[in-house]
Image: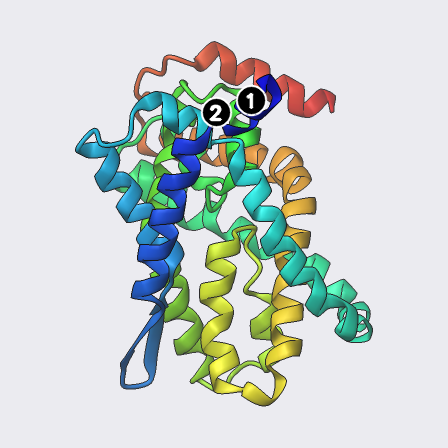
Amino acid sequence: MEGLKEYLKDWKVHVLCGIMVFVCEFIGMHAFKFGPVSFTLFPMLYAVVLGIILALVKAIPHEMMVTASPYITISVLMLGARGAATIGPNLGLIVKSGAALVLQELGNLGTIFLSIPIGVLLLNMGRSVVGAGFSISREGSLIVIGDMYGLDSDEGLGVMGGYITGTLFGTIICGLMSSMLANTGWFHPFALAMACGTGSASMMSANVAPLMEKWPEMSEQLYALAYSSNTLSGLDGMYMNLFLAIPISNALYKGLWKLKGKEPPKSSTHEVEEKADDVVVDM
């Protein structure tokens, strides 16, 4: 009896999740098309918005949120199984594209050279711009910043802000960009599919959906390449962040403030920053 109670203690979380899933799936996917541009809203986005609303009106107690957190890993396993099922039949294509799939991760460093100059030169941001700008702020980025600086640091506030913003608007922006690039005719469909991998399952899905709609005859290959790219981004992205993204972001941050001829805003984590830089070098 005690064992049964242990298994059923989280029943409120399961019931609430079940209701939210039913509501979001009932709404379903909705595609919006404006001329050559299109994007799709997924049930995952509705779930995030619905969760935020319920939290704001205090319909979900904090204790329930803490209890629900570990179940994210279990849910992601199901998505991983679905993606892995498409890799097997297209393994030859993936192996043939191996070098391109690995090297495309270097493209994720582009966020540094776009966001950090805007944050420092135009918005006068402090150390939070490093956390927000060194990556697209997904789960792996939270782990890196949390371990190096702490999520309660300026860098932690930056990466959390990017994570929440990306969850709300990332899928829409990804869908729009993917749709626009697909309609230019400049890139091969496989190249666009490989670019869909950002380390975020929801963004990857939003990216690849317009491609699969445009080229339905190769939808399985496109999804396999996108999922493989997304998996590799999660694997090598950690090392890319540690050895390249964060050191480059720190150097660019300091250089831009010197260029402005001003002292950067006071940071509550300047000592932690120096220690974190040393950790990267030692590794």
Question: Is 188 or 75 nearer to us in this picture?
Answer: 75
**Outermost residue to the front:** 1
Tell me the residue at 66%/77% (across/down).
221
Tell me the residue at 33%/36% (across/down).
120
Query: Mark 1 = which residue?
Result: 6
Asked whether the beta carbons under mark 1 and mark 2 sit within 8 Å of each other, the answer is yes
Q: Is residue 1 above or below residue 256?
A: above
Disc 2 is placed on an element classified as loop
Colouring style: rainbow
Q: Which mark is residue 9?
A: 2
Tell me the residue at 60%/38% (across/down).
241
**Local crowd size for mark 1, using a 10 Å CA cut-off: few (<14), some (14–19), many (≥20):** few
Q: Is residue 135 above or below residue 101?
A: above
Residue 223 location, quadrant: bottom right
Residue 180 location, quadrant: bottom left
**Local crowd size for mark 2, using a 10 Å CA cut-off: few (<14), some (14–19), many (≥20):** few
In percent of width and height, residue 144 lies at 57, 30
| Image mark count | 2
